[in-house]
Amino acid sequence: MFEANFSVQEQRELARQLTSLLSTYRHISDSYIIEFFSESLWDTLPVSWQEALSDLTPPQIADLLLDRETKDRRYPSVWPLSLLALRTAAHALSFPRKVSDGHTQNAGAGMPEEFQSNQCQSSLLGHIFRKHVKPKKQHEICRLGTLVKKLCDQAKCNCVVDVGSGQGHLTRFLSFGLGLNVTGIEADGNLVSMATKFDRQLLLTLDKESQRSGKPQGLYSAPGPPPLHVVGWVNPKASWDFFIQQLGMPASECDSNGPTTGPNEKKRRVSVPSELELKLEQKSCQTNAEESQATLQTQRTDINVCDSIAHINTVTLPSVLEPETNGANAHKLPISTKSFESGVTSSTILDVGRCTKGPSISDFVLTGLHACGDLSSTLLRHFANCPHVQVITSVACCYMKISTQENPNPPGVIQPPFSDITTESRSENGYPMSDWVHGLPGHQLSYKAREGACHAIEDYLNRLREESGLLQTHCYRAVLESIIRVERPDLRRPGVQTVKKTHKLSFAEYVRLALPRVGLPVDLPFDPASVDAMLAQQGRVVVYFSLVLLLAPVVETLVLLDRMIFLQERGFQSKLIPLFDAAFSPRNLVLVAVKPKTAQSALKIL
C-alpha cells in the first residue's frame, strides 16, 4: 500500500479505513491517562481485554502490542480476536517510520550511527555547522538539507525559503554548506538576532581558518550568498502574495530584547544590524564568496562539510518532474512590494546577492522543519496556489495546535502580532484540508487525539524493554489527579508541569512537590490505603497508555494522508518519506511534492 505507486484510490481507501478504525476506538484515543483512576478507564475496556493484558510485563507489552517489527510473538494467554485485530490494523494502516536507506541506530543507545564516535557531534557535519546545534538538530539539518539540495538540483531551482527558521541552523547549512540562495523567515525576533549573530561567527571562523592555513577556505564548490533572515509571522489566513511580500521584510525590525545565554543570566539587549549594515555585510560576504569561488576553480576545499549525500542518495524521491523540464531557471513573475514597516521594496533586499536582480522574484523551494500546527498546512496551501513555489518539503509537528471546524482556536496557538488590512479572511482549517477526508463520516480528530499523535512511540518502547523507572510517572500523576478531585471536584486536569526526577521520588515526596503547583496545600490529607491500592495498579496504567500510544501513529497517518489527498485534488503528486531516525527524532516523516511543468502552466492560466 505504501509503495511508490500509491494510487489515488488507494489513498482514499486508506483514509476511509483510518477514520473507521479511529471512530471505533475514539474512547481510547480521546482519553487522558492522568484520569485513569478518576474516570475508571480500565473498566472501559472489554473484560476479555482486561484478562489478557492485566498481567503483562513491560517487555511483553512492547513485543506483543507496540512493536510492529516483532516477528515471533509468544503470548502468555489467548488474546481475544478484537484485540488482535486492533493491533494488526493499527500497524498495517500507519505509515512506515523506519528509515530505509541503510542508516542504523546504535543498539540501546537511542542514537543514530553518525554519533558513534561522539554522542554530541554528527560525523556527517563539519564542525562549523555543529556549533550551537544539539545532536538531534544536527541529524535533522544534515538529512533534510541534503534532500532539499537534491530536489533543488532536480527542479533546477537554486532558491530556498525556510519557514520557521529559528536560529538559522538549517538556513546556514543550506547556504554556506550546500551553495543555495536561502531566505529564512521567523516570527521571533530574538531568534533572528541569534541567527544573524551565528552567521557572523561562522564567517569569522572561516576567516581565521583561512589565515591559519594560508589559503582561502571554501564550503562548497559553488558557494551561495549568506542567508537572508526575515522577521515575519506567517498568517494561516493570509494569501500567498502576502507571504511573498513578507519575504522582503528586513531583519532590522527585530525586537531588540535578545535572549539570554543561560538560565542564571539576566535578559540582555542584543544589537541587531540595521538595514544598511545588514545589506553591506551581505554584499561584503558575497564578494568574499565570489573570490573564494574563483580560487576554488583550481583548488579544492579542505573542510569536510557533509558526507551524507552519498547515503541520502538512496532515498527514493517522487519522480514528478517532467522529462522536458529545461535548464532555464523557471518562470518569473514581476513583484513590486513594500515592507510594511520599513518602506523598503522587497526588490531592494533581494538584489543583495539574492536569487535575482531587479523588480522580480525567482521561483523557489519551500521548506519547513517541524513547522508547528497550522504552519505546515499553510505552507502546503502556498505551494498549491503560489506560482513561485516549485518544490515543498514539509516536516510537521504539534498536531494538537492544528485548527479544526470543532476547535478553530486550539490552546497554545500564537496569535498574529498585529492586525493587517491586507490579510484575507479565510475559513480553511488545518484539518481536514482535503475535500475527500472532510466528507468521510467520523473524520473528526479531537485535541487529545492529535496531542497523542505527537508522542514518541520508539522512546516508550525502550522504556518498556528496559523496565525503566520512568514508567511510574503516569501512575503517580493519575493518583494525584484522584487526590485533587476529592478536594476540588471542579479542578480537572490542572497543569502540574514536570516534577524533576519523579521516578526517583517516593509518592509522598512527589505529592509534596506537586500540590503547591496547582494551588493546594502541601499537607493536603489523603487516604494512604486508597493511594497504595492505586499505586499497585501501575501495570494497568502502563498497559492502557500503551493502547493510547498504539493509536498515535494512526492519527498521525490520517493527518498527513489528508494533506497528500489535498495536493492530489489540486493536481500534485506527493510522497511521504521517513527521513530521520524515529528513535532520535520522533516526527520523522517529510512530505515532498514537486510541481511538473504542466502544473506551472495551469497556474499561469488561473
Image (spheres, helix red, strand yellow):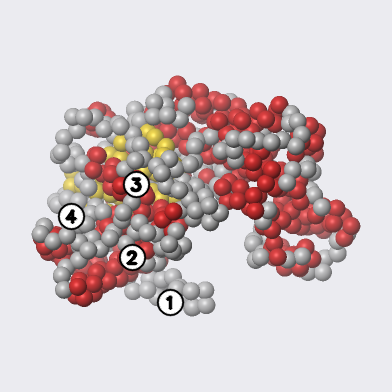
Name the residue that disc number 2 marks: 127
Q: Earlier in the sequence, mark 4 or mark 2?
A: 2
Cβ atoms at labels 1 and 4 below 8 Å apart: no
Which of pointers 4 and 3 indicates the residue nearer the eye? 3
Disc 1 versus disc 4: nearer the observer: 4
Looking at the image, residue 332 sits to the left or right of residue 197; the answer is left
Q: What residue would you read off at disc 3?
A: 311
Q: Which of the pair 133/523 is nearer the observer?
A: 133
Which residue is the site of mark 4? Answer: 222
The image position of residue 221, as x and y in percent, is 18, 55
The mark lying in front, picked from 2 and 1, is 2
Mark 4 belongs to which amino acid?
Ala
**Residue 53, image x and y in percent?**
75, 39
Residue 268 is tagged as 1
Crowd band around label 2 with a 10 angstrom C-alpha radius: few (<14), some (14–19), many (20+): some
Q: Amino acid at mark 3?
A: His
Q: Amino acid at mark 2?
A: His
How would you rate the neighbour count of disc 1 (Cα within 10 Å): few for under 14, some for 14-19, many for 20 or more? few
Identify the residue shown where x is 31% and y is 36%: 594
Q: Secondary structure at mark 2?
A: helix
Looking at the image, which residue is at 29% across and 68% down?
Answer: 202
